[in-house]
Image: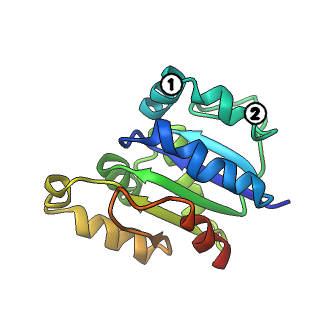
Amino acid sequence: MSVLGLVSAAGGGVERRLRVELAVPAARRGWRLAITFTPTAARWMSAAGETARLQSLTDLPVRWESRLPDEPKPYPIPDAFLFVPATLNSVAKLALGIADNQALTSLAEAIGTPGVPVVIRPQADPAQRAHPRWETHLDTLLACGAHIADGPSTDPWEPLLDLVEAL
């Protein structure tokens, strides 16, 4: 069974949509889920009761904290990654190589691993997208081999699984 790294930042709706639109459909398709949150997303998911629901879909730990140096890695490098939603903050950090949390560390390693596709679904409002570095950050990630699957924030997320599977 292939491992899908499902990474989420604290974008609006993640607490309602991640499990329903991505995790459950991915598990039904046969993916073994390696779920990782940014620290703020972890707070949101925990408060919504979603962390335990997501954990029930996988035998791998749902993560947001780094492991200690003497602890083994909790799972192998996933075969593919899907980063949704990817907020302005997380996109900027990832493009600049700032891996200051477990989610961004996982993605930075994936981008640096040949043969591991990374699909990023940005979620930013018009004012955030108007930031003068937004397009540069997306271009940087594209140049690193990531795939940007941009679209309206209301678009369904499940079709992103088709994209990951086609890579």
Where is residue 2 drawn, in percent x and y?
A: 80, 61
In this rendering, the answer to whether 81 lies above or below 145 is above
Occupied quadrant, residue 142 = bottom left
Task: Choose between 109 and 152: the one closer to the eye.
Answer: 152
Q: Are marks 2 and 1 in contact (CB under 8 Å)?
A: no
Where is residue 129 drawn, in percent x and y?
A: 20, 60
Examine the rendering and report whether any part of residue 68 can be seen. Answer: no
| Residue displayed at 60% across by 43% down | 19
The residue wearing badge 1 is 48
In this rendering, the answer to whether 114 lies above or below 93 is below
Give, as a three-letter code, the residue at label 1.
Ala
Tell me the tag on residue 106: none
Separation (CA) of disc 2 from disc 1? 15 Å
Of the residues under marks 2 and 1, which one precedes in the sequence? 1
Is residue 97 toward the left or the right of residue 63 in the image? Answer: left
Give the quadrant of the C terminus.
Answer: bottom right
| Residue displayed at 53% across by 38% down | 37
| Residue displayed at 58% across by 56% down | 109
The residue wearing badge 2 is 56
Q: How is the image coloured?
A: rainbow
The residue lying furthest to the right in this view is 1
Task: Choose between 12 and 1: the one closer to the eye.
Answer: 12
Mark 1, other Cα within 10 Å: few <14 / some 14–19 / many ≥20: few
Where is residue 16 drawn, in percent x and y?
A: 49, 38
